Image (tube, rainbow, N blue to C red):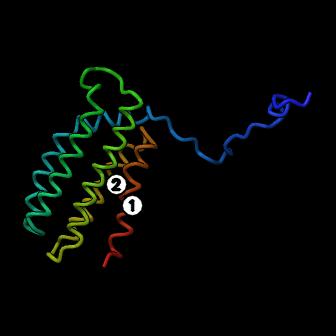
Amino acid sequence: SCGIGSIVGTVPRFAMPKFMPAFPPLSQIDTVAMDSRRLGLARLATALCAAPLVAVISDMASAIAWGVGFLLAEAWMWLPTTPFARGAALTRKDRVSYIGSAVFGATAWLSLSVIFWLQDERGSQFLALLIWACLLLNAISFAFRSVLALVIFAGPVSAVMVATPILP
């Protein structure tokens, strides 16, 4: 017989080559999300110190815009990690939402670094470098638990570190 079933049965299945890493499971992000929730107050305290510094070095509008962006990122992070507060596991939807919030949160901190980098005030570029170093240390601290978190947190930082110095 020449039916499609006989043809499909003879087609070899293709697997990812051995040298290609498999995409990590989303559940890898659970411990990172739990830590993010736990460290929320520390990030808030840091932001409360950073916003006035932005107002002094840059301007009040930049400080307010950054502060609002930061608070939105934090609020978003709290929503998908709420199951942890109730002792429940994250769903796939929670994990994907957390990943989005993590990228948004990293973007908030990276925008702060760019604000500092673009200022002419003495020491402001050093503050940008300090933010990048802290963000990279944060990313590396998650590396042993989640390759996915390492990519999510270190990727954007690396890109901004390379791109920012070539800005006009």
Q: Amino acid at mark 2?
A: Leu
Q: Amino acid at mark 1?
A: Ser
Instruction: Answer left or right for 58 relative to 134.
Output: left
Q: Name the residue located 58 percent from the left edge and 41 percent from the top edge.
A: 22
Q: Quadrant of residue 98?
A: top left
User: Do the CB atoms of the residues marked 2 and 1 lie less than 8 Å apart?
Assistant: yes
Q: Quadrant of the N terminus?
A: top right
Question: Which of marks 1 and 2 precedes in the sequence?
Answer: 2
Q: Quadrant of residue 50?
A: bottom left
Instruction: Answer left or right for 105 relative to 123.
Output: right
Element under disc 1: helix
Q: Name the residue located 81 percent from the left edge and 37 percent from the top edge.
A: 11
Coordinates of residue 127 in the picture (x, y in percent): 20, 65
Element under disc 2: helix
Could you tell me how many numbered marks the image carries?
2
Q: Name the residue located 33 percent from the left edge and 70 percent from the top edge.
A: 164
Coordinates of residue 159 in the picture (x, y in percent): 39, 62
Q: Residues within 10 Å of mark 1 (few under 14, many from 20)?
A: few
The CA span between labels 2 and 1 is 8 Å
Q: Mark on residue 158?
A: 1
Rendered view: 83 above or below 132: above
Q: Residues within 10 Å of mark 2 (few under 14, many from 20)?
A: some
Which residue ends up furthest to the top in the rendered image? 87
Instruction: Answer left or right for 4 relative to 162.
Output: right
Which residue does the numbered mark 2 point to in the structure image?
A: 136
Coordinates of residue 51 in the picture (x, y in percent): 11, 57
